[in-house]
Structure formats: C-alpha cells, structure tokens
Image: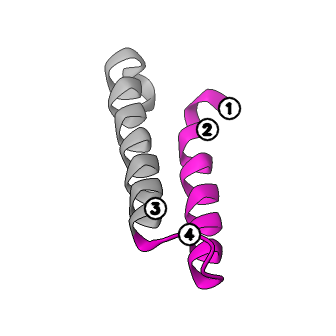
C-alpha cells in the first residue's frame, strides 16, 4: 500500500522543503525549479506505471 502513495508523499515533502529553502535563500530559483519539476515528473511517471501494471488502482 505504501508503494502507491510513496512518490506523492515525496513530492509533498520536496515541495515543502523547497519552499522553506527558497524563503530562507538557501537554494537558488533554478535549484528550486529542478527539485519541484523532478518530483512532479516522478509522481506522474509513477501514476502511469500504476495505471499500466495495476489497473484497479489507476
């Protein structure tokens, strides 16, 4: 069950951490965008994989 929600939890954690880091000037805007886009792509790919291999969850 955790495998289904893992990437989405990761996306949320990266989003929160990135927003905090940007607000405190710990990372640049480019790094922020790379982290958010990368996590979003991971969640999207995982959604496609679940839809292909586990249609009842898709």
Q: Identify the residue under disc 1.
A: 2
Which circle's residue, 1 or 4, is located before the other in the chain? 1
The answer to whether the residue labelled 3 contacts the one labelled 1, judged by CB atoms less than 8 Å apart, is no
Which circle's residue, 2 or 4, is located before the other in the chain? 2
The answer to whether the residue labelled 2 contacts the one labelled 1, judged by CB atoms less than 8 Å apart, is yes
Q: Identify the residue under disc 2.
A: 6
Residue 58 visible in this rendered orientation of the protein: no
Q: Assess whether residue 3 is covered by the magenta stretch.
A: yes
Q: Assess whether residue 2 is covered by the magenta stretch.
A: yes
Q: CA distance from mark 2 to mark 1?
A: 6 Å
- Report the disc number at residue 31: 3
Quadrant containing the C terminus is: top left
The answer to whether residue 48 is left or right of residue 32 is: left
Q: CA distance from mark 2 to mark 4?
A: 25 Å
Q: Residues within 10 Å of mark 2 (few under 14, many from 20)?
A: few
Numbered disc total = 4
Q: CA distance from mark 1 to mark 4?
A: 30 Å
Find the magenta span and give its range: 1-29
The answer to whether the residue labelled 3 contacts the one labelled 4, judged by CB atoms less than 8 Å apart, is yes
- Report the disc number at residue 57: none
> Residue 51 lies in what quarter of the image?
top left
> What secondary structure is found at the residue carrying circle 2?
helix
The answer to whether the residue labelled 1 contacts the one labelled 4, judged by CB atoms less than 8 Å apart, is no
> What secondary structure is found at the residue carrying circle 4?
loop
Quadrant containing the N terminus is: top right
Q: Against 48, is 14 above or below?
A: below
Q: Position of residue 33 (x, y in %)?
A: 39, 63
The answer to whether residue 23 is left or right of residue 38 is: right
Name the front one of labels 3 and 1: 3
Q: Position of residue 11 (x, y in %)?
A: 54, 52
């Amino acid at each position: 069950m955790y495998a289904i929600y893992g990437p989405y939890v990761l996306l949320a954690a990266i989003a929160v951490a990135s927003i905090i880091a940007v607000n405190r000037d710990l990372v640049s805007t480019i790094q922020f965008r790379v982290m958010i886009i990368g996590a979003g792509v991971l969640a999207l790919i995982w959604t496609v994989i679940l839809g292909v291999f586990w249609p009842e969850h898709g």
